Image (cartoon, rainbow, N blue to C red):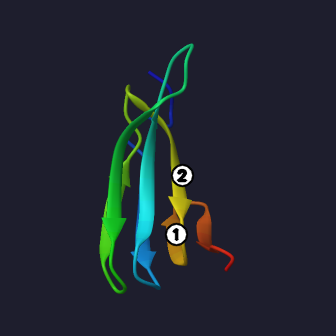
Amino acid sequence: MSDLHGDYIVVKAKAQGVQVIGLTRGQDTKFHHTEKLDKGEVLICQFTDHTSAIKIRGKATVLTKYGTVDTED
């Protein structure tokens, strides 16, 4: 198990309709889960054996153990 398994990120929507998309691990990367957030909503996401990446569409703040990132317009 790698060090990334179990790591969390926090996504806070700064606008309506922010999409958070979980991507699978393995030979073929596929979407496996999608959430839509309204302005002000917060989602806590975890990297797992099935989730290797998380894609965020829309205006949001992302908090990780490495720091904070704001998406571009």
Q: Position of residue 41 (x, y in %)?
A: 30, 79
Q: Is residue 19 left or right of residue 69?
A: left
Q: Nearer the viewer, mark 2 or mark 1?
A: 2
4 up-or-down from 56: above or below: above
The amino acid pointed to by label 1 is: Val
Give the mark nearer the N terminus: 2 vs 1.
2
Marks 2 and 1 sit apart, C-alpha to C-alpha, by 11 Å
- Secondary structure beneath dot 1 equals strand
Dividing the picture into quadrants, the one containing residue 73 is bottom right
Dividing the picture into quadrants, the one containing residue 10 is bottom left
Q: Which label belongs to residue 62? A: 1
- Secondary structure beneath dot 2 equals strand
Point out the residue furthest to the front here: 17
Residue at the spot of label 2: 55
The residue at the point 50 percent across, 26 percent down is 2
Q: Are marks 2 and 1 in contact (CB under 8 Å)?
A: no
Point out the residue furthest to the right here: 72
Q: Position of residue 35 (x, y in %)?
A: 32, 57
Q: Residues within 10 Å of mark 1 (few under 14, many from 20)?
A: some
Q: Quadrant of the N terminus?
A: top left
The amino acid pointed to by label 2 is: Lys
Front residue (pair 32, 5): 32
The residue at the point 40 percent across, 74 percent down is 17
